[in-house]
Image: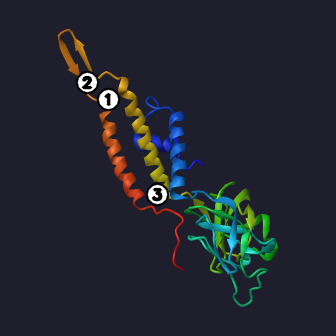
Amino acid sequence: MDYISVAGVRRTTGIGTDLLNNTDIGLMIDDVEKYTERWLNTKFAPTTVVETVNGDDSDTIILRHNPVLAVREVKIDGDTLSPLYLNVYRESGKVIISTQDGDSPEVNKFKKGDQLCNFKYVHGWVEHSTTQTSTSAALESTDIGTSVTIDVVSSTGLLADNWVEIEDTDGYKEACKILSVTDLTHIVVDQIVFTHTSGSLVTLLENPYFIKRYMELEAGLYAIANVIGSTYTFSTSFNIGPFSAVKGVPYPHFTAVASRLEKERDRIKSMIALRPAIFKM
């Protein structure tokens, strides 16, 4: 998953390598990342899934995972339905077959029956970064497919394996993965399902800041608990002849740090809503 790093946890807590090694912090990060995904019922990076849904002979269906970043492929009882004819509500995962004038979807209902509707789509809770460019040429219907080359004004700041979102006022929006950056004005992405006008925005997607910060704080508290807990073998007092002295509790400053981190973690946690979230349309 790699949402957060060992360096980030060390920066948050001030714990040095003399107190806790990188391997142990890495294991704590793994635990926190897995827990957070399960707690919030989503991924924090674009993730492709295949889902089978039971239809009800209506034009509407709700996918299990959200936010939905792109619907790549739909089959209804073996018949292909082009994503061009879908209105996708990102946050709720609601999908409606469009019946606007001029639209001619191959299938106009999600057929009733067990496991007849199959979707391949990309979901994940991500946000826009400050890295943004735009297309310098339109993506036509002939460009729809896989391994698509996109002309951009500048590829600066974009790397292979990054995810970007393409959108404009034409209403078409989708996320795609960069396979390679050919040069300063061309990128190759894994798949395009919509046409896009010249000048469409191409924005780099990143993990949500508050989610990453929450994970750093949680992992940091794990790490502090480990450091303090390991002091049970430390001597807190000693005797010299008839005299005795008390050294006190080891690492008292970490208690204060833990208290501050707990308050920040709880504040962020109170702002995070569990998914899936069904919104009124």
Q: Nearer the viewer, residue 49 or 29?
A: 49
Quadrant occupied by the C terminus:
bottom right
Image coordinates of residue 165 in percent, x first then y, are 64, 67
Q: How far apart are marks 2 and 3 (CA)?
A: 39 Å
CB-based contact (under 8 Å), mark 3 and mark 1: no
What residue do we see at 54% from left, 65% from top?
276
Q: Residue 250 carries which label?
A: 1
Residue 201 in view, yes or no? no
Q: Mark 3 points at which residue?
A: 210
| Tag 3 secondary structure | helix
> Which amino acid does the dot numbered 1 rest on?
Pro
Q: Distance between the residues labelled 2 and 1?
A: 8 Å
Image coordinates of residue 36 in percent, x first then y, are 51, 52
Image coordinates of residue 69 in percent, x first then y, are 63, 67
Image coordinates of residue 43 in percent, x first then y, are 58, 57
| Tag 1 secondary structure | loop
Q: How far apart are marks 3 and 1 (CA)?
A: 32 Å
Query: Could you tell which of marks 3 and 1 lies nearer the N-terminus?
Result: 3
